[in-house]
Image: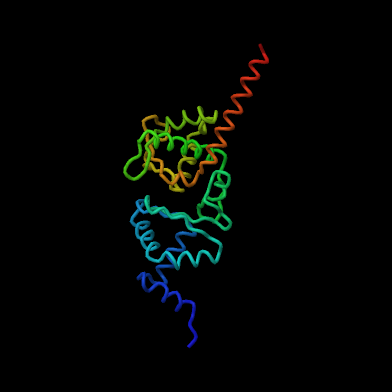
Amino acid sequence: MEQTFNDYLEQRLEPAAVSNDELRELLVRLLNYGILCRDESQTERELYDRFLRAEQPVRELLDLFGLQVQLDRRFEYLRLLPPGSQLPGMEDAAEQAFAGSLRARLSQNEVALLLVLRMQYDKALREGKLDERGFVTESFESLGIAMMNLLGRPLPDKITERKRLFQRLKQLRLIDFRQDEDIDSGESWLRIHPMIVDFVGAGALEALEESKAFNAEDTENAEEGDE
């Protein structure tokens, strides 16, 4: 008798003790959210562990559509990357994010905050301030100050826009904070996920540093010309 595709999948999934329905649930979750963090919730813990058990057949199925999986076993998260993607640096990060659709572009405010989050993460890494899960803790106030110092731009003035900005990055699992935190309070804190290192590549930081140096040189030359 001719073997159906479902029969083939069942055979491939049998050693992993994963059913076709469980595979379908995992794929739907990945395609809808594009990310799984094991410590985010019990549901994501179960799905992440299910992916590890059936990793090869899942990767093969996704590869049919040109989709790649970026897996970090140390910090226990995985991300789905759209067709043609490289491991993301900021040059294509705006097209690597997922939020209910396969490609979702990031706004200028979101990209700016991502750069600052990555720089603050690197600073904490050099100072040995990571916790046992690789997270870095920062206050909302310090991020606003860093945004001005590093990029010369403030966080959105309107509190609704500011909340939307942080909620967006929380949705991408790049930061974590309590839903009841007052984002406008200097005493409120968030955690930066170690995933920020993969999401914002080192090349983006180098480009930012070069831009800052170039702007500083232009300012210096302009001041000398005024004398």
Name the foreground residue: 41 vs 152.
152
Residue 38 found in image quarter: bottom left
The percent position of residue 142, horizontal first and vertical second, equals: 42, 30
Name the foreground residue: 17 vs 145.
17
In the rendered image, is residue 2 in sight? yes
Q: Residue furthest left?
A: 132
The percent position of residue 214, horizontal first and vertical second, equals: 61, 28
Considering only vertical position in the picture, is 130 above or below 14? above
In the rendered image, is residue 33 in sight? no
Name the foreground residue: 167 vs 221.
221
Considering only vertical position in the picture, is 99 above or below 60? above
Q: Residue furthest bottom?
A: 1
Residue 170 found in image quarter: top left
Q: How is the image coloured?
A: rainbow
Considering only vertical position in the picture, is 140 above or below 220? below
- Residue drawn at (37%, 40%), measured in percent from left and top? 180
Q: Report the number of numbered marks.
A: 0
The percent position of residue 226, horizontal first and vertical second, equals: 67, 13
- Residue drawn at (51%, 44%), measured in percent from left and top? 201
Describe residue 178's horizontal placement relative to residue 111 as left or right: left
Residue 221 found in image quarter: top right
The percent position of residue 166, horizontal first and vertical second, equals: 46, 40
- Residue drawn at (66%, 11%), measured in percent from left and top? 227
Name the foreground residue: 172 vs 164.
172
Q: Residue furthest top?
A: 227
